[in-house]
Amino acid sequence: MTGKRVTFAGTWLAALLIAPQLLLVFTFFYWPAGEALYWSFTLEPPFGGENQWVGWQNFKTVFDDPLYWNSVRISITFALASTALAMGMALLLALFVDRQLPGHKAYRFVYFWPYAVAAPAVGLAFRFIFAPDAGFVSALNQWYPGLWNPARDGIDAVILITLANAWSMIAYNFIFFLAGLQSIPRSLTEAAAMDGSGVLRRMADIQFPLLAPTFFFLVVINLTDSFVNSFGIVDITTAGGPARATDLMVYKIYSDGFKGKDYSLAAAQSLVLMLLVVSLTFIQFRFVERRVHYS
Amino acid sequence: MAQIDIRNVSKSYGKTQVVHGVDIAIADGEFVVILGPSGCGKSTLLRMIAGLEEISGGTVSIGGEVVNDREPRERGCAMVFQNYALYPHMSVAENIGYGLKVAGVPKQARQARVEAVARTVGLDTFLDRKPGQLSGGQRQRVAMARAMIKEPKVFLFDEPLSNLDAKLRVQMRIEIRKLHQRLKATSVFVTHDQVEAMTLADRLVIMNKGVIEQIGAPKDVYDRPASVFVAGFIGAPGLNLLDATIGADGLTLSLADGQRLPVDPARHPALKPGPVTVGIRAEALTIRPAAAGPHAGLRASFDFTEELGVGQHIHAEISGQPLIIHVDGRHPYRPGSALLLDVPPQELQLFDQETGLRIQETDVLTCIDEAA
């Protein structure tokens, strides 16, 4: 990238132009993050007053709490399950659309719509659809009473939020997979066809290996998203219950901080979550972005 | 035996028809080149033979069996693609051996055959490299080796040389010709490069706008183009084409500016008066020195010279139309200077202006007898 590079003659103009963006990032990210960092090392009185420096005490409390580790375990299970589900389904749909099966143009539009639905709305929809007494899935309970009840059974509740989260992420993955598949030159699959390879064999030998960069990118994005953006779904569908069965890390931060009024513990937990996301992002930049891209 | 029979084959995409009822019969072991400008339907035709494109109408048979509804892998063809279509994530050896792997050939047998084929195309030291680490010519060789390894009945080439530089192209052309002599597989080669087509083909098929203009041996096509289109397409340069009118006597041609030429009555005894297109090869024209006395030929004005090394192409203008004259020596004319041209009447080729088709000479039969 040499040659054509737009530069500003005056530093002032450049600074003026990037100021609004920087101001936003600072106000809504660095400042709160800085506050959280400060709070996590102090005891923050819930109704105002002087902060008290406590060092690593908050972190110690968090890590000694079995409820916190419960939440970590659920979060990881939830993130892995919804990532696998969302990516598997999206890949399948993208393969169908890429093969130009009948109606593929309409599907291409429809599959992307869920991305435009906000998490709380997704949660509300799934809460109705999966309501054990009146929802669409209540038919299950007709056949086998008590089989499905996310309000009482922890496993059902985890399944519910996993489905809802996966559903909302399929659209995003679908678009990336489809773009990835369509960027594979058609002549490669044709050459494989001439080499005697059938549809499934071509997917396994040609398309999947060439999708690898897209695949790794999406794994990281999906995991990050499952850790951070699942609050809306959990809050609407299960509110962390039953018996903390869906108490994801991000939800526990909220409930400890705003319901339990323990800002300091919540801040310490946010910091841990932030470090987790930062390290995922680091993996993304360090290993995935630098992966060999085939020319 | 792998003769290919193409009968009344057509292809449409929705309402647009791109190939209009094409018939070609290709003998076993023959090297046929399909030549035409881009968008003439030649690649589509090749892809229909390969099975990569559905056949909208007509039949394609290979070795006497209709293959219209067969998958590519059931047709026994191998194909070399224009952009080589090498699998970027596989090594050279894996690329070459992929077809055998799919066919379930055990690893050791596969390895031996990959090495043997790689040696014949001079790639045996590159087997571990990825396609991205190879030059254009080497990639081309991998593509060839990948097609060869299955010992196919039919080779299909889709403009395989068009991404190479000029020197490499000539070299690969020779190698493809040698390969064909050795393997004797029926080959169909698609190109838009007429030099490539002339040098490679046993038989040429010239296509334009989805129909076949002419089928014949390269020399026959060069000597007796069947239409104005073929005349302008074959040869470097193509036939000089001039608008003219046949006089009422059927024996003289007149150009738009009034210059006249006699027609050979032995070759064209019964010409109808009216407009025609006259074709003259650049090599058939000679420039006579200005001082050589009375002149019955044509008068043209000099534009510029193209240096060829072995001679020159003189670009001139006659009766408002461009004309190219091939000369062996070097002729330092200045722009605008007048050229006197000798035009042997037996070199004139006439084409119907309405249909674009050749007006056949009466000596066609004797010519073919002589050639035989």
Image (tube, rainbow, N blue to C red):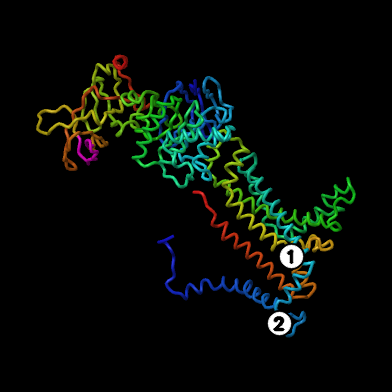
Q: Which of A108 and B170 is in front in this view?
A: B170
Residue that mark 2 sits on: A53
Q: Within 10 Å of the Cα at label 1, are there few (<14), some (14-19), or many (20+) other Cα atoms? A: many
**Mark 2 or mark 1, which is nearer to you?**
2
Which portion, as a residue range, is magenta?
B300-312
Let me know if residue B52 appears in the view.
Answer: no
Q: Is mark 2 on a helix, strand or loop?
A: strand
Q: Which amino acid does label 2 sit on?
A: Trp
Of the numbered discs 2 and 1, the one sitting upstream in the chain is 2
Residue type, mark 1 in image: Met
Mark seen at residue B10 = none
x, y percent for residue B37: 40, 35
- Image quadrant where one finds the C terminus of chain B: top left
Please tell me whether residue B302 belongs to the stretch shown in magenta. yes
Residue at horizontal 22%, vertical 37%?
B312
The residue under the point 41% across, 43% down is B136
